[in-house]
Structure formats: structure tokens, C-alpha cells
Image (tube, rainbow, N blue to C red):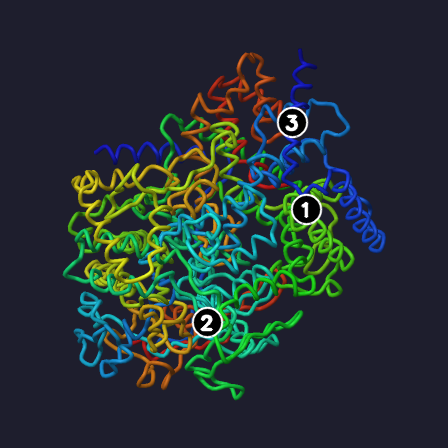
Amino acid sequence: MKLFHKLGILLFYLMALPSHAEIPSDVDIADLKKAALQIDQQVAAFYRAKKFDVPKVADDATFMRRAFLVAVGRIPTAEEALDFLEIEDPLKRELLVSYLINSEGYHSHMSNWVFDLMRVTERGNGERTPRVPYRHWVREAMASNMPWDEFTKRLLSSQGDGWDKETGGVGYYTRDLGMPLDNLSNTMRIFLGERMECAQCHDDPFGDTERHDFYQLAAFTHGQGAVGQSFVAPLISEFNTKEKLFSPEYHAIKMLRVGVYELSLAGGGNGRIPLPSDYQYRDGKPGEMVAGKTPFGKMVRTSDRKDEGDGRVKLADWVVNKTEGQFSTVIANRMWKRVMGKGVIEPADEYVEAKDTNHPELVELLSSLMVSLKYDLRAFQQVLLLTKTFQFATNPQASVLEGGDDLHGRKIDRLSAEQIWDSLVTLADGNPDRKPRRSRDERIIVGGRPVLVGKKTMSQLSKEVLALQSEKDVRAYFDKLLEEIKMDDHYQASGATMSMTAKGVGDGSNPMVRASELSSPAPRDHLLYIFGASDREVVDAASKEPNVGQVLSLMNGFVQDNLVGKSSAHLYKCLEGVSSNEEKIRRLYLAILSRPPSSEEMALMMEELKARGDEGCRNMVSALIMSSEFIFLQ
Amino acid sequence: MFRKADELTRRHFMSGAARTYLGVHLLPMLGSTVASAGTEDAAAGKAKHVIYLYMSGGMSHVDTFDPKPKKKEIMGKTEAIPTNVDGLMVGHYLKKTAEVMDKVCVINSMNSTQGAHQQGTYVMQTSYTMRGTIQHPSVGSWILKLAGKIHPELPGYVAIDSPPDHTGGGFFGAKYAAAPIGSPGEGLKDSRLSRGVTEDNFGHRLSLADKLNRQFHGRYPNVDVKAYEDLYREAAALMKSKDLVAFDLKLEPESVRNLYGTGRFAQGCLLARRLVQHGVRFVEVQLGGWDTHFDNFTGVEGRCKEFDQAYAALLTDLEKTGMLKDTLVVVATEFGRSPTIDKIFNDGRGHHPAAFSCLLAGGSVKGGTSYGETDATGSRVKDGLVTVQDFNATIAYGLGLPFDKVEYSPSKRPFKIGDNGTPVKSIFS
């Protein structure tokens, strides 16, 4: 029976493998293992040079918890933990990695990472636009493991309809409506590890970037606007007035402006830009046209005489293909940081050439591996997860290399807010990856009320509206739409029901789901916020700093109500049919800390259970969740 | 009645628990951390608390506190209106604030070297520019470090609706980090014992967790691991504090709640006043959405709707309750917005660090005054330039704290609350 069960699990792991089909066909596991070995050889050479001992390999339990948290962003369930620890197969670590990297959890966890990096928010802030389709576009790109080079090109060069799956990458620009220069600074930082924020306004006194250079780069992306902007502008100014406030016309035109036009992007990048009115240097005058010119790598230029209209395509091509390995190095290092805890280059968004790092050969190797894997981030991370370097036991000492990682065993680090949340959800409700991803909210909401439900979706509406070719056509379409909306029962419903109907579906309010399926950023009253989740206004703004609110939330509230004190919580399922206290303690340790208790801990907990029975059991569960071991990654 | 009984039980249950199981005596451990040396300057401010209102995104100075009434091309849709102080004018979105300007000193000559949000906010809140290698403490952590806690159990620093990356303790550590409040109406989340958990069991949980944590910390001598171990003790003391009611807005009378209004920021301001009243040293409240690149005038109007009533109410309420003299009320932002209007962005305004406005009120600040001046277009500082470092040093000075006191990072580098900034002393009486 037991053997059969174990075989079943092994088969289950293996069954996950066929989805390797999504990895380019010329990549197979043998190649990935070979690449992992090459990395280990580099690390070993570094140990020899530094006269370091080779660290011990982490035990199965530590490896398992680490692999789960790194690859899928949550702890294993008690069942997963037990199965892995009991199975005796020399390849089980490799099989676990395949299982994890091919699961739904992998891209959920990747989505948290990319949402932080790209500042993906979906709620309008203050007077700004909601950005639901962009969030979904990025989420789906992670789910389909879109290669990073393609992802980058689509973000930087798309134009058209924000709701269309083909062109939804325009959200990268429309997210920053009215602030194209900040957007460009972020582009340089995210994809190339260049910090140019200073040069937006003045020559960088510490670097070598001048304001003129920045404008030459900005020339490529200049000239952004909504599709068909001029056709709708007269209607907007007509109805967006105090007199018309809260009339059906006002609500309807606002819906079109915010939900359709401001999510679309016209203009492929003029390729030239006027210098700003406060331009202060001798190499140009305010208002003078500057042509596009890339600051390093293989030079790409545009004209200052006419708008070429393909500046963004040129820029995207330069970023990805003409920056002499900078693009591949930056993403390879970001992936290394994700898997190993610290970047080989730190800070990860300040690029330095391989030769100026602590690990020149390793940096070169990672960069070329990224290219040969065709920017397949999943395959790349699988390689890293397969290395010995990833498996080394935790090193309690800080790095001995000044300002960098000595690669000498993983350093301890607090879990991210998302890892903590997803792990708590796993304890409360079991494996969260069995639930479907959040679907896109396609409802047309006018004045807080969903209208034309079952008749028309936002995607259809957006497609139709953006196809209109004149002000006259827009007016005719708008009049007809307005009639339909006014006829709609939902629209006529009283104000009391409106707020109720507008919430619910797809707004991320379902509590027991992965962080990646909640609304972005996390609401301020959420546990994610307390643990330092990024508000996604600036690049990578998450925090792991401790505060008193965090420990309060592990002691009381959600944790108590949904896990510790709730007998139907998933973690207690592993106790079914178990009567001995010793076995209960063992299983709860596996469920929460993914390891069996030490004999000392067993004695401590036996005493607690003996004295207080079920309450003692809950006290133990509470204490394990309050333990630092629960929130730190070893 | 119910509430009171509730409170007694809670106090009772905790008083024994922590001492019995953690073997600690809470009060001495959590008492004032530092006896403030104070500055020797007799004219220094005498405030004890700070309420720091941060306008995130970059508050347009010309549309709010530095209007240029004669320059239509700069003002756009904004009109300047008079206030209750002769010669001080504000944007027309600030009608209630206009009535309390007699308590406020406007600093019109702020200047920052950082024109992007992340860098701008960072320098405004820490006095230092961002480095990849160190996290500087925010001004709230600094004040807590220099002045110490007032109430032994309540947090010394509370941040309401603020992004977490700026409210940690930086290199001062978790002891100086803010307790975060996401939703003012909810108060300090999870600070009450859940139903069904007895005093006895709670004590056992703490004791078990403490044993596990010491063990783990023994294995990993890491400052953050240690911080969590300590935070449990702090949290346990906080849960039993009778002053936990400081976080409960529902205890405010209807009339006071109405004075502030119902918006999120308004609730934050009201909570800030309650916290200060109960002995919290530094409270930060954020109001986001000031990044009005696109359609500036609609944006500013919307933000001011949130700000105006709440700010005016806060000053009025603090004065009425006698706390204004002890509370420095700061309004800060990372930069201003360009006086030139961007037509292509639907009348937007860009970032403008060269000149912007911040406000100080309360304590011994001379109300109804302004400091510094911009040129006719609001583009440059013409007179009395105040750097962000000067501004933070001024906050310390307003509390009579040694703004030039050096604190060392773990790597032994010297830092000061306002770096090399000097306080603007003349604004204090």
C-alpha cells in the first residue's frame, strides 16, 4: 500500500514533465543539467581561488522547503512534504524541481516578481485610470512563459488597443500616462540596469550621463497618445463639465475615456523630441529638435527633420539586440537573485561589466546561458534550481566579500510578503494552485453600474470604438451606446444596489487565493501590506523590514481565525485518523515547518499536548507560525 | 459598559502572561529609550510630537500654497483666494485651510536636488540620497531615536497609509520602524486577542514561540531574526495596554468625526490626533495621487478635496484640545510641479524640484507667516532657500532636539537627521 502510494507520487511528478513542450524543443533536461554543472564548476573554481571549504549539501527537508518557496512561492502542504521526504529515489530532487517549475505556482510566483518590477497596478489611484487589461496581459505572459526578449519587445513597441491580447503590452506606456520620461528612466533601469533618473533634469554629477543624452533617448518614444484621440476630444470637453456632472452622458463618456481611450496607444515613437523649456546647457536650446541616438552599445539613430513613426520599434530592438550582452546579463542576474537570494551583481539594477564583478566568468556564463536558452526564464531558473550551488546548506555567517555574495552557502533572508501570504493560504486552505486564475473583468461599468451584461464586453466595445475614423462616427456610436445604456435595467436600478453589483467578480476580493490573484497592489488593510508588499508605484519597492504589525498579525486576526482556531483548516486534515500525540506533533511540524521536530522539540510539545489536549495542539500550531523559522528562508 | 469590561479582562489576562512566560518585566524594558540631551539653544522649539502629513507624488505648489495670482498662464484654472492672514493667499481648492492659515508657517522656498519620485521621496524622508548599500532611517525613526518613546507600550512611530519601503527603521533597526496602519478605521490590525483564545493559552503560545525563536536565533545570529524575537515582547505589551483605545476612531464623538470628514486621509488625521493625545511620538499620514502629469487641475482639485477639510480640522482640533502647542504638524512632499502647463497632457504639470512649498504649524512655530520666496513665475527660489536637509533639521529643532547629533550606522559611518542641513530658526517664536 505504502509503496504503491509512493509510486503514485513519483508518477505524478513525472506526469508534470510533458509540459516541457512549452520550452523550446532544442532544450531538454540533459542540457539543463549540463548547464547546471558548468555553473557549479565556476563556483568550485571560485572556492579554490578563495580557499573556501565546499559547503555541505542541505538536508532533504531544508532543500524541499527552499525549492518550494523559491520556485512556487509557498511552503509545501503536509502531504507534499511527507511524500517527498519518504520517497527513496536518487533523482528525487531533480524530479521535485521539474514538478515545481512546471506547476501553476511557478508563474503565480513569477507574476509577483514581475508586478513589482513593472509596477503593475490595476486600480486607478486618485483621478487616474484603472488598468485591468494590462495586469492580465502581464499575468498571462508569465503563465505562457513568454520569452523575456519577446516580452520586452512587446512592452516597448506595441501600439493599439489595450484590451486586445495582441497589443495589450501598450499598458506599459499607458500605465504612465503623461509621464513618458519617467517611464523611459524605468525602462533603462528594468531592462538594462542603467540609472538615468537624474539625467531627466540635469547632467548626472556622479555618472557620465548628460541631460542631452537622455533627450536623445527620449526621442525614440516621443509622441504618444490615445488611438483616435482627436475624434473623441470634442465629446469629452462637451460632457465633462460641471453642468453635466453625473448625467448619463458624463458617466458614459468617462467610461470611454478611462476604460478605452486612455488604455490605447497610438504613435510608434516620433524619433525626435524638442528640448524642454528649462534646458540649461550649451549643447542645445529649449524647443530645439533633438534626434534619437542611443547612448551605448551599437549606435542607432533617427532623424531630427521628420517624425519617422517607428522609434519605439527601433528602441526595443536596440535594448534587446544591440547592447552587447547588457540585456541578457541584467535579466540573468535578476533570475540568479530570485533563485539564489542575492544577485551576482548587486544592486541588481546597476549594471557593471562582468570583468568588474566579483565573479567575472560566472557572469559571462549566465549571460550566454540566457541567450542560448532563448530567454526562456523558466528553463533558466530550472538550471539554477538544479545546481549544487542552490543545494548548499545555509551559511549563518555574512558574506566575506565586501558588497557582494561569496556564494558560500545561502544567507538567511525573510520571506517576501507574498511568500508569507501564499504559505498561510496553503495552511488554511490547501494547495492554492488547484484554483483557477482570476479571469479578466470584462464588464462595462457606467457610473458604478455594470451595463449591457451578456450583450457586450469591454474588449468588444474597445475594438469597435477604436475602429471609428472620424468625430462624426464617434458621435453616432456614442449616441447609440447611450440609448442602449439608458434602456438597461441595471443602469436604471437605484443607487443602493449599484455599489453591490459593481463589486464581486474578478476584483480580487476572494480572500483565500494566491497574492498574484488578489488586486494589485494589495489593499492597505491586507496582511500583504503589513508585511511590506510593494505598492507598485516605484520599481521593486517591496520591503522585508520587521515591524510590530507583522507579529501582531501572526499572533491574532487572520491567522487565528482561519488557521489556528479553525478546525476545518486544511492543515488539520493531516491529523485524520491519527491518535498518538507524537504522530500529531510530527505531522503538524511537517505541515508548518516542512520538517520533523527535533527530540528536544518533541519533548516540549508532548508536554504541551499532554497538559492541554486539543488546546495544546492549537497552541503549538500558533507558536510554530509565530516562529522565525516560519518566516525566514534557509 | 461592555467596552470597559472588555478592557479590564484584556489587561488582566496580559499582565500575568508576559511576565510568567517570557520572564520579562515589560515596563523597564519598553520605557523611554533615550533621555534626550536636547539642544542648548534656548530658543529651540518645545513640541513633543510630530504629525507628518506626506503629500506623495509631488504637490503642485503654484496651485496650493504658492499661487501667482497675476500670472494667468501659470495658474491655469486655479484662482488664488485670500486667507485669514493678510498677504497670504492659497489656491481656491483650499477654502477651509484658508481659515486656519494664522496657525501655519508656509515655507515657499523649498529646493530638492532629486526630480524622480523614488529618489525625491527618499531624500525628503531621510536627508540622504539613495545608495544601493545602505537603508537610511526615515525622519520618523530619527525623531524616535533622538527623543525616545513617550508611552511605554504604544509604538513610538506610527505610519498611516504609507508605503512600507520608507517607514522601516533603516539601519536603526526594527525598534525604530513604524507600526503600519493600512486602514485608519480599523485601527491597529490584529491588536486584540481573538475570541476563543484564553489568557492562559495565549501565554503558552508566547512561551513556546519564544523558546523556538531563541533556538533559531542561536543558529542564525542575524539582526532581523533578533528583531522578530524582540517584537513579540513589544506586541504582547502593546496588546495589554489600556491605551490601545488610542487606535479606535469609533470612540470619537460624532461632532469631531464630522469636523474631519469621512475620507481616508481625514480618518488618518483624526487617528493621528488620537495617537498623539495618547503619547505616540511621531505619526505619519500619507495622501497619495499628487502626481498630476496628466490633467493637473482635476487632479489637484481631487487631492485638495481630501486634504482641505482634514488639515483644517486637525489644526482646529489640536488647538481646541490644547495639544497644538506640543505638536509640530508638518506638510511635506517630494517636489513641486512645473509652473508651465503641459497642453499635450491635457493641462498637466511635470515634476519640479527646483522650488516647492512645505508647511509647518504647531509647537512654537509662528503662525500666519511665510518663509522664503520664489520668483514671479514660481520656478526658482529667489530668497531664503531651504534644502530638504534644512527642513528635516528644522523638524528636529522644532522639538528642541540636537539636530547635529551624530549617529553611526552598523558600518560605523556618521549620519545626522538633516545631514549637513541647518534649521530655519527664525520661524519659531
Mark 2 and 3 residues: CB-CB less than 8 Å, in contact? no
Q: Amino acid at mark 3?
A: Met
- Image quarter hosting the C terminus of chain A: top right
**Residue depicted at x 18% and y 76%:** B85
- Within 10 Å of disc 3 (Cα), the crowding (few <14, some 14-19, many 20+) is few
Residue pointed to by mark 2: B115
Query: Image height check: is A483 above or below B293?
Result: above
Does dot 1 land on a helix, a strand or a loop?
helix
Residue type, numbered disc 2:
Gly
Which one is in front in this view, the residue at disc 1 or the one at disc 2? 1
Q: Nearer the viewer, residue A496 or B328?
A: A496
Residue in the image at 25% along x and 46% along y = A448
Chain label for disc 2:
B
Q: Quadrant of residue A602?
A: top right
Q: Is residue A461 left or right of residue A290?
A: left
Q: Which secondary structure, mark 2?
A: loop
Which residue position holds label 3?
Answer: A15
Report x, y in % for residue B385. 40, 81
A67 shown above or below B201: below
- Relative placement, left or right, of A357 versus A159 is right
Q: CA distance from mark 2 to mark 3?
A: 53 Å
